[in-house]
Amino acid sequence: MSKKVYNTAPLPFMGQKRKFIKSFKDALHNYPPDGIYVDLFGGSGLLAHTAKQHYPNATVVYNDFDNYRKRINAIPETNNLLEKLRMLISEWPKDKRITGVTRENVLKAIKRHEDQYNYVDYITLSSSLLFSMKYVLNYEDLVKSTLYNCIRMSDYKAEGYLNGLDIVSLDYKVLFEQYKDSDKVVFLIDPPYLQTTSVTYKNYWNLTDYLDVLSVLEGHRYFYFTSNKSSIIELCEWVGNRTLTTNPFAHATKLEVNTSVNYNSSYTDIMLFK
């Protein structure tokens, strides 16, 4: 039986790199099949999954700092909850605001589920009940939100998604120290974007954090992801031109894709590799 290859993360995750997957695969041909690929900011694990599927003999380290595994392990319970919600809003118009008794019943069902399992994957649930690209992390914030009938009609599945990965949960600096001296290492670097929504991330990132990450690039092979909102590329070009410090992105290949947040907001995602 052939292994399932995921071109998108099996559960919703803000900032997953699905639009770059084809370009990422194409670029991987220039990197060692038996290399060590370290996904410093693992996120949804999509980059790590793709690297492992592309090079089965490579060592691929997935830094699951956001505990995406917990959400994957809870998929059976999440599917069960979504089935109950589908029944509650089966007569409700698609994409319309949920109000009145139906809204109360939806919230009650979610609270009962949380009381029973002591957990609800609110990020996944948000994609079925909130306006596009809006997320909550707890019941209290969900109660304050406007609910919509945008519920997913099929079950979530993630069979084999994390197979073969070396999974850790570490500060990226600690993980970098473990592998920085290996001549076979390729770092996958997708930090939380500066000046973009980061409600689903554990920690708030500021400019200092962003600049600290750049020290990882020097002297190493890497894939680095950012957006045009961060202006980090322009900053590094300025540093390289105006000071004696080397621009870490000098001679790197750059690819761009446009990403829509909603009907009137968008930005450009950027992948650089070297």
Image (cartoon, rainbow, N blue to C red):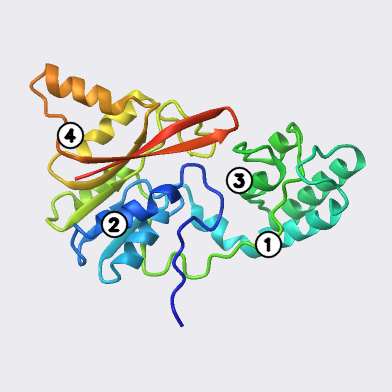
Work out how far the residue at label 4 is from the one at label 2, CA to CA, in angstroms: 22 Å
Point out the residue furthest to the top here: 242
Instruction: Give whichever of discs 4 and 2 has the lower sequence position.
Output: 2
Point out the residue furthest to the left here: 244
Q: Is residue 49 left or right of residue 141?
A: left
- Residue type highlighted by circle 1: Ser
Query: Which residue is rendered at x = 85% and y = 47% of the image?
Result: 92
Work out how far the residue at label 3 is from the one at label 4, CA to CA, in angstroms: 34 Å
Which mark is nearer the camera, 4 or 2? 2
In front of the other: 4 or 61: 4
Query: Which residue is rendered at x = 73% and y = 62% of the image?
Result: 80
- The residue carrying mark 3 is 123
Which mark is nearer the camera, 1 or 3? 1
Work out how far the residue at label 1 is from the one at label 3, CA to CA, in angstroms: 17 Å
Q: Say if mark 3 contacts mark 4, CB within 8 Å.
A: no
Instruction: Give whichever of discs 2 and 1 has the lower sequence position.
Output: 2
- The residue carrying mark 2 is 26
- The residue carrying mark 1 is 154
- The residue carrying mark 4 is 248
Position of residue 274 measured from the top left corner of the image (x, y, whole percent)? 19, 45
- Residue type highlighted by circle 2: Asp
Query: Which residue is rendered at x = 87% and y = 47% of the image?
Result: 105
Q: Secondary structure at mark 3?
A: helix
Work out how far the residue at label 4 is from the one at label 1, CA to CA, in angstroms: 44 Å
Instruction: Give whichever of discs 3 and 4 has the lower sequence position.
Output: 3
Q: Secondary structure at mark 4?
A: loop
Which mark is nearer the camera, 4 or 1? 1
Q: Evaluate whether residue 167 shows in this view.
A: no
Which mark is nearer the camera, 3 or 4? 4
Instruction: Give whichever of discs 4 and 1 has the lower sequence position.
Output: 1
- Quarter of image, res 74: bottom right
For disc 2, the neighbor class at 10 Å (few under 14, some 14 to 19, many from 20) is few
